[in-house]
Amino acid sequence: MEADFYLGLDFGGTKLLLGEADSSGRVRYEEKYDSGYMNQREALSFITQSLDDYFAKGRRKPLAMGLGVVGRADSSRGIWFEMDTERKDAVPIAEILSQRYGIACYIDNDVRSAAKAEQRFGFGKNSDNFIYINVGTGIAAGTVSGGKILVGGHYNAGEVGHTHSGIEAGIQCVCGRMDCAEALASGKGLDNCARLYAKRFANTALNIPKEGKVDARDIFRLAQTDELCAFLAAQAARVLANLIMNLVRVSDPDTVVLGGGVVADGFLLPLIKENLNPGTMRYVTNGVVLTRLDPKHIGLIGACTVAMNL
Ligand SMILES: [Zn+2]
């Protein structure tokens, strides 16, 4: 029987979600592989091992496969330039995988892939000018302007987490600047802030583990009763509102879509909205909304959308 599905690989840097979706973006099979921290060459070998494992299970051949990868990727030539500034070992991954498996293969950056999913299956169906902001471990955005997604001269557009949060917290960001939005309001940022401000709210009930990260869900769960958590949630909302308003001034969208683990449960959304200036937001006529795509699958649906190579 003819294959009627696309294979997507959503590679976030420490884990790989591999799965199948049909042409309407419905996920019908998925598998997760934990990779841990690895360099780019190791990542390529991890991805091929996972694909070997997938095909060894007798799955049917997909119409095409798509990869959403962390870092800089050139979707037109299928080259994955780097995972981050520490891990750069450019690899023509689309060609390598397509030769190895005899299947057409396409790639893009992971957040741009998610924005493509939003464009095809989400709010983008009704908008040619929207921003998809992913707030997860980090913060990045896919900007669609006039129906086209912004890529940039070095495939690096959308790293909006590395713009100033508007708050002087004194936190050094991984990018070298101080107090970036990502350093304060991402999953990692909330962990940074919990540790920094715990001294000010000494009687907090928040679990701040010595090893590992503070769970954003704990912060939101305790925000009604715990002063530190209320402060952290309010500050993250202010940072994200600043980020949204700054981006709105750049690309003039009618819709701002939020996705990613930190915002997916909807807790922060009303707090963010309280911080939005109506004048700045006057042309964002569809408002700031949560993605309607399953937050757990948006990266995978994005990878499958990349496979569709539209
Ligand atoms: Zn930064």
Image (cartoon, rainbow, N blue to C red):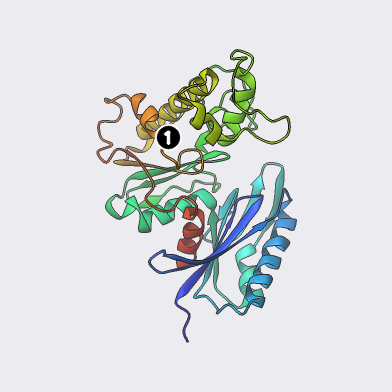
23 or 64: which is nearer to us? 23
Q: Residue at label 1?
A: 267
x 60%, y 78%: residue: 102
Horizontal and vertical percent for residue 48?
Answer: 68, 67
Count the marks: how many?
Answer: 1
Horizontal and vertical percent for residue 55?
Answer: 63, 75
Number of other residues with Cα within 10 Å of mark 1, as a class: few under 14, some 14 to 19, many 20 or more: some
Horizontal and vertical percent for residue 303?
Answer: 51, 60
25 or 216: which is nearer to us? 216
**Residue sticking out furthest to the bottom:** 1
Helix, strand or loop under label 1: loop
x 51%, y 58%: residue: 300
The picture quadrant where one finds residue 69 is bottom right
Q: Is residue 105 left or right of residue 210?
A: left
x 45%, y 62%: residue: 305
Quick check: can you spot residue 177? Answer: no
Q: Is residue 222 left or right of residue 256?
A: right
52 or 173: which is nearer to us? 52
Q: Is residue 238 left or right of residue 52?
A: left
Mark 1: which amino acid? Phe
Quick check: can you spot residue 249? Answer: yes
